[in-house]
């Protein structure tokens, strides 16, 4: 089936099987920042924004997304870089496999919540698992990022 | 120091956050054949027949491989020094399948759907055999898990397959029995630890193809690219010189990738078809069919005098290696060798036991590597002993634990699979770690317990730990530094960045020695064609072993630079001072910049490439030490536990990168906490793993984490690069005992099997109540 | 997932008919649960153009379209306040924001998941379901029935009344399914006590409710009696998340704690 997606602002038409999930479609289209951790909507690694909202791309059927706006981390490069700067300062990046999805979720949170508290940040990001960092450094980095007006 | 021990963001953090390509699957060929593995539905069975006729007819099915397609040549998948201390007990495919999830055969097809469909069309008939699912009954069981005659050990490791023993070990110092009978207070306890799963976010994945020189090129998410290359060559009898293994960015390893996973199968498919191929584990395969931590039973006896002098430690360990014996002996030994020296003043020690085969998912390397199991048992037992002695557990430790300048006979007796190496503790700030930790956790105010609310009590507990820094005389790392025109460097290392930050800290070490900044040192790591050898990322070896190699290479490069600058300036070597940018001969008032010198070397005069390689093998393995303190709350009515605060004070020498070191500690603390409280491993009665995805295998989320305070003791290890020891593993060791001790101090319940679930605590509380009535 | 056909029917009637043509035809809500549970589907029936995802508030009810994602309910200002916010709280305990942006109320209700946190909260409020064929039905009645009616849910209605509430989920980690969940409300001076994930599906503890609703005075003794009664009248069982015995203990403890909380909030 032919589906028209808008990926990071660019229209992309692609022929997909009806049972294909967005994660696979995006990787086919070379958006390789979108990665698989579990394939069962339980780790958050595959998160992309659909119409601005974080969603698990491993579990969204591509055929249902005709004309929808998809944002991968490539689409928020500036913000991702800024967040990465704060991660770097806190030593909050390790293997990095969870990071693009983290950037997208943090970006969505920033738009959705005004001045979130640490508890709110945790609650918003809880679906993004990370096995490396122990999370605390991430939270400090995110708090700094949210305060960063530059 | 300008770079080392300074805040330095990781060199790759930005690119990774921004989603740049980097991980194994990002390099897979688009038209790679997709490999799917059929996995055994039985814990133990013999394959009677395989009917793949229908599957072969499916359009798009390229190749089906089973045991019939391979010569019987046993090997071990463990990524360890060669010859390996693990039994060679694995075949590419075998007629026998030994656990639910074991490899039966594989299909390579044009796409995933076709490969999966083909699997459904293949009929395999099994003769179902009786499995061994309880490791305590495995030894000398009537069922033999590895009856095949070809398997063998590479050197004596106590391998007795006909008794289901993959390895066994015995050591003693002094007369344990006598020490115990001479002591005034004796405690005895058995502890159980579970088969923790690594649960790295990136599943195991590998892809392969032949390049234009007709060589086999693999990208693999591995911790040991050089071992992978060697094992593929051995198992498939394919020339080592025609294999290139590239380790790109790895999405977490923790020991789980210190072994062969799909690499051999993937290579075999490429070799037989000449085509690109790819094998990625599903999350279920990661849980069921990769490796776990070795579950263990540890029986500990401690004997002491009433004044709190520890006299004897007796430790029997039974370890379950599952269906294959990867890392069986070495993990077992580390449960002793990196735990027992903590109490080095005892009269006698005994450490012995077996590693047995069962029909469970095989066990392998996992951060902590036996030390976490041993630490849980010993550090819990110490608190039990203190309880009986009526002695403060901190006082007891301060009296009996190892101190700077001291040694332990264990170091020379126990190595990893072989004898060890004697060494003195040139740096050991354990004393400071304990004292500082007490302050940070408010020990004196809060120990042992405070009632915070009706039904909620808070308790404190602690444990001390040690690890190693590489394996002396075995672990080798090498580094090459190349000077470029314009005056920047390439650093080529075999060392394996798996997310622990090694590329960054190695660049820092080179930059510090060369007096330049990290951005002038371009790191490329772990490519078997391009980088020098390194054993890989394990045994906490990278900072110490590879770091020393980098330091040596940088020093040699500096030397060469000065020689060349002297030539260029017409000066004497001894008159040159180099500050990283300028070569200055102040005596004759001449100077040249590094930039000019390099441009001159490559374009103008005396043209030559400056490139140096150095290697390092440790002669000792200076242990990092730490004290871990837990503050927990226990709900007396439900047994629910919350860890409120965790304090780590670590002596890992000088931290090359303080923030990344902190990240190593904190990440490990949370993994250790997961093992302590949440990560239950549950099998059905028939040996099927129930906890095989993130919905049933519960790793800590950001909601469960305590607030963490992590500090480093001031410490300088002469033998380490810029005074560093290792820090990759040490953090995982203390949580099981510290949290368990804290729970005991909160509510009086001692749990001796991991994980410590609320149910177990509640049962304990009920028992306490019954006893007090 | 294998999907043979993907159809956008012209009407609910057509959708309903399609659904009944084949047991392997399915309507889809958010689809996250289906992804994890179904391997192959004959016809996937899209409803998003027929059933909205709106939340409408009138004086008496909140009407929620079946396709409304859980996150929309969770953050809705009226729902956040209603009955001390127990519906929002139950949703907050489900996975992460990204799943809640996709999973729908329709998929939750029709799925009748025994572990469902949201169903426990909804049952404590007793919402009304609006089906295409069967029309209106109380959630309590729907959960009790064992028939697989394969109807299409159009919307649900939450009554707006003054009342207090308590929700609690016990789970090993935040992302885990419940070992037990419970929701308690006091609406129009009537208590409702719901316990789910026992591991059976959320049910009202009717006798316990009777006991407390007819009591003249509420004190510790009564509350303990009510908690005991819940454990006696409802069935509990074991699975790898928790044993029957442990679940019974949890139920007793949290019913008592919940009741006290509800009473305190009311006063
Ligand atoms: C990984 C994971 C973890 C979860 N953990 C929890 C948890 O801890 N607690 C909890 O309470 N919930 C949990 N859930 C469940 C979640 O809250 C939703 O209830 C669930 O995903 C169903 O919603 P859906 O929109 O995805 O349904 P779908 O997958 O779209 O549908 C589920 C079923 O409902 C049917 N259906 C959908 N809409 C309609 C309709 N309008 N009319 C008729 N039938 C319909 C479908 O045909 C299908 O049979 C979890 C879900 C996932 C995927
Ligand atoms: S891969 Fe989609 S949530 Fe894990
Ligand atoms: S950094 Fe490795 S999973 Fe988060």
Image: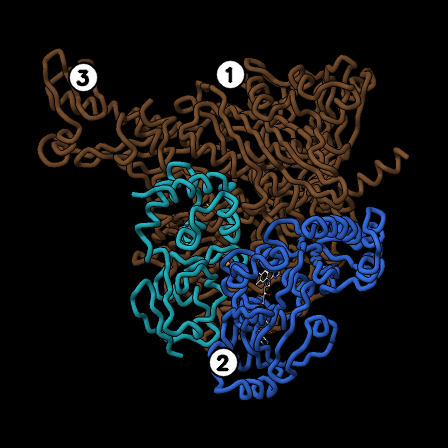
Chain colours: A cyan, B brown, C blue
Marks 1 & 2, CB-CB < 8 Å contact: no
Residue C50 has which mark? 2
Q: Is the residue marked by circle 3 packed among few (<14), some (14-19), or many (20+) residues within 10 Å?
A: many
Q: CA distance from mark 2 to mark 3?
A: 82 Å
- Residue where numbered disc 3 is placed: B576
Across and down, in percent, residue C142 comes to 70, 74
Q: Quick one: B662 or B36, which is closer to the camera?
A: B662
Q: Residue at x 47, y 53 (%)?
A: B237
Name the chain under label 2.
C
Name the chain under label 1.
B
Q: Nearer the viewer, mark 2 or mark 3?
A: 2
Task: State whether residue B704 appears in this view.
Answer: yes
Across and down, in percent, residue C47 comes to 51, 78
Left or right: residue B26 versus residue B173 is left
Residue B622 has which mark? none
Across and down, in percent, residue B727 comes to 49, 31
Marks 3 & 1, CB-CB < 8 Å contact: no
Task: State whether residue B147 appears in this view.
Answer: no
């Amino acid at each position: 089936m032919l589906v028209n997606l808008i990926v990071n602002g660019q229209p992309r038409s692609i022929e997909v099987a009806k049972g294909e999930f967005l994660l696979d479609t995006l990787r086919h289209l070379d958006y390789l920042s979108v990665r698989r951790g579990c394939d069962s909507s339980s780790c958050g690694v595959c998160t992309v924004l659909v119409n601005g909202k974080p969603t698990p791309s491993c579990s969204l059927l591509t055929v249902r997304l005709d004309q929808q706006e998809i944002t991968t981390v490539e689409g928020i490069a500036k913000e991702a870089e800024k967040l990465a700067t704060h991660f770097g300062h806190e030593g909050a990046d390790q293997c990095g496999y969870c990071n693009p999805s983290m950037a997208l979720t943090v970006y969505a949170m920033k738009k959705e919540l005004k001045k979130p508290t640490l508890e709110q940040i945790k609650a918003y990001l809880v679906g993004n698992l990370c096995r490396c960092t122990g999370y605390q450094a991430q939270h400090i980095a995110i708090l700094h990022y949210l305060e960063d007006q530059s | 120091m300008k770079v080392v021990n300074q805040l330095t963001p990781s060199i790759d953090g930005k690119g990774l956050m921004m989603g740049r390509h980097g991980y194994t699957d990002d390099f897979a060929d688009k038209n790679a054949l997709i490999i799917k593995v059929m996995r055994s539905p039985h814990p133990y069975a013999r394959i009677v027949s395989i009917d793949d006729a229908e599957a072969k007819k499916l359009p798009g099915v390229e190749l089906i491989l089973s045991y019939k397609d391979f010569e019987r040549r046993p090997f071990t998948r463990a990524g360890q020094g060669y010859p390996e201390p693990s039994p060679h007990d694995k075949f590419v495919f075998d007629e026998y399948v030994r656990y639910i999830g074991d490899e039966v055969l594989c299909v390579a097809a044009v796409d995933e759907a076709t490969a999966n469909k083909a699997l459904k069309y293949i009929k395999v008939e099994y003769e179902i055999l009786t499995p061994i699912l309880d490791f305590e009954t495995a030894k000398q069981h009537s069922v033999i898990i590895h009856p095949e005659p070809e398997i063998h050990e590479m050197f004596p490791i106590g391998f007795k397959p006909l008794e289901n023993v993959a390895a066994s070990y015995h050591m003693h110092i002094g007369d344990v029995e006598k020490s115990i009978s001479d002591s005034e207070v004796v405690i005895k306890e058995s502890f159980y630890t579970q088969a923790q799963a690594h649960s790295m976010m990136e599943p195991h994945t590998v892809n392969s193809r032949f390049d234009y020189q007709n060589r086999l090129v693999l990208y693999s998410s591995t911790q040991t690219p050089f071992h992978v290359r060697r094992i593929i060559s051995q198992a498939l009898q394919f020339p080592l010189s025609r294999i290139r293994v590239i380790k790109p960015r790895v999405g977490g390893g923790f020991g789980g990738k210190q072994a062969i996973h799909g690499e051999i199968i993937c290579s075999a498919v490429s070799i037989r078809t000449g085509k690109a191929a790819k094998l990625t584990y599903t999350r279920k395969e990661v849980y069921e069919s990769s490796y776990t931590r070795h579950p263990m039973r540890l029986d500990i006896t401690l004997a002491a005098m009433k004044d709190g002098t520890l006299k004897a430690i007796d430790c029997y360990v039974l370890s379950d290696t599952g269906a294959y014996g990867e890392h069986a002996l070495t993990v077992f030994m580390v449960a002793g060798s990196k735990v027992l020296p903590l109490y080095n003043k005892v009269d006698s020690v005994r450490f012995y036991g077996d590693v047995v085969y069962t029909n469970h998912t095989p066990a392998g390397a996992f951060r902590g590597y036996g030390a976490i199991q041993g630490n849980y048992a010993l550090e819990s037992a110490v608190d039990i002993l203190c309880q009986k002695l009526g002695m403060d557990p901190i006082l007891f430790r301060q009296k009996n634990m190892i101190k700077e300048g001291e040694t332990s006979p264990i170091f020379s007796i126990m190595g990893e699979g072989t004898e060890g190496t004697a060494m003195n503790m040139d740096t050991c700030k354990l004393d400071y770690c304990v004292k500082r930790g007490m302050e940070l956790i408010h020990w004196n105010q809060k120990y042992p317990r405070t009632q915070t609310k009706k039904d909620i009590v808070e308790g404190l507990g602690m444990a001390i730990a040690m690890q190693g820094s590489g394996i002396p005389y075995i672990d080798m790392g090498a580094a090459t530094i190349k000077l470029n025109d314009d005056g920047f460097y390439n650093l080529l290392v075999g060392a394996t960045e798996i997310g622990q930050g090694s590329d960054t800290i190695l660049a820092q070490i080179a930059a510090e020695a060369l007096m330049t900044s990290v951005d002038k040192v371009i790191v490329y790591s772990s490519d078997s064609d391009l980088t020098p050898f390194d054993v890989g990322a394990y045994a906490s070896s990278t900072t110490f072993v590879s770091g020393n190699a980098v330091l040596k290479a940088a020093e040699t490069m500096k030397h060469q630079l000065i020689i060349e600058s002297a030539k260029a300036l017409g000066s004497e070597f001894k008159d040159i001072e180099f500050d990283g940018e300028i070569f200055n001969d102040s005596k004759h008032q001449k100077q040249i910049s590094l930039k000019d010198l390099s441009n001159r070397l490559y374009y103008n005069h005396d043209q030559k490439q400056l490139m140096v390689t150095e290697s390092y093998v440790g002669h000792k393995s200076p242990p990092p030490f730490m004290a871990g303190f837990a503050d927990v709350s226990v709900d007396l009515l439900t047994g629910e536990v919350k860890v409120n605060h965790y304090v780590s004070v670590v002596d890992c020498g000088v931290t090359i990168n303080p923030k990344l070191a902190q990240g190593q500690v904190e990440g490990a603390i949370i993994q250790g906490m997961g093992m302590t409280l949440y990560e239950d491993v549950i099998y059905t009665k028939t040996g099927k793993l129930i906890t095989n995805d993130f919905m049933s295998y519960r790793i800590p989320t950001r909601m469960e984490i305590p607030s963490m305070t992590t500090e480093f003791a001031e410490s300088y290890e002469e033998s380490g690069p810029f005074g560093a020891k290792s820090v990759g593993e040490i953090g995982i060791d203390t949580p099981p005992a510290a949290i368990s001790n804290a729970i005991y101090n909160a509510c009086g319940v001692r749990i001796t099997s991991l994980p410590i679930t609320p149910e177990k605590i509640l049962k304990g509380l009920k028992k306490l109540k019954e006893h007090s009535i | 997932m294998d999907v043979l056909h993907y159809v956008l029917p012209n009407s609910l009637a057509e959708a309903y008919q399609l659904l009944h043509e084949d047991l392997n035809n399915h309507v889809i809500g958010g689809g996250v649960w289906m992804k994890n549970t179904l391997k192959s589907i004959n016809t996937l029936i899209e409803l998003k153009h027929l059933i909205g995802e709106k939340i409408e508030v009138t004086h008496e009810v909140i009407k929620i379209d079946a396709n409304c994602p859980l996150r929309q309910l969770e953050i809705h200002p009226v729902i956040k306040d209603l009955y001390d916010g127990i519906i929002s709280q139950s949703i907050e305990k489900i996975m992460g924001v990204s799943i809640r942006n996709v999973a729908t109320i329709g998929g939750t209700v029709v799925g009748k998941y025994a572990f469902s946190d949201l169903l426990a909260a909804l049952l404590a409020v007793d919402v009304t379901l609006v089906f295409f064929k069967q029309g209106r039905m109380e959630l309590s009645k729907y959960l009790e029935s064992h028939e697989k009616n394969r109807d299409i849910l159009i919307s649900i209605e939450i009554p707006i009344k003054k009342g207090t509430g308590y929700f609690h989920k016990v789970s090993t980690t935040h992302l885990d399914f419940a070992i037990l969940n419970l929701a308690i409300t006091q609406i129009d001076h009537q208590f409702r006590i719901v316990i789910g994930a026992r591991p059976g599906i959320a049910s009202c503890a009717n006798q316990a409710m009777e006991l407390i609703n007819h009591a003249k005075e509420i004190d510790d003794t009564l509350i303990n009696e009510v908690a005991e009664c819940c454990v006696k009248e409802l069935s509990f069982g074991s699975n790898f998340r928790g044993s029957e015995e442990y679940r019974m203990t949890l139920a007793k403890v949290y019913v008592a704690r919940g009741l006290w909380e509800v009473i305190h909030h009311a006063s």
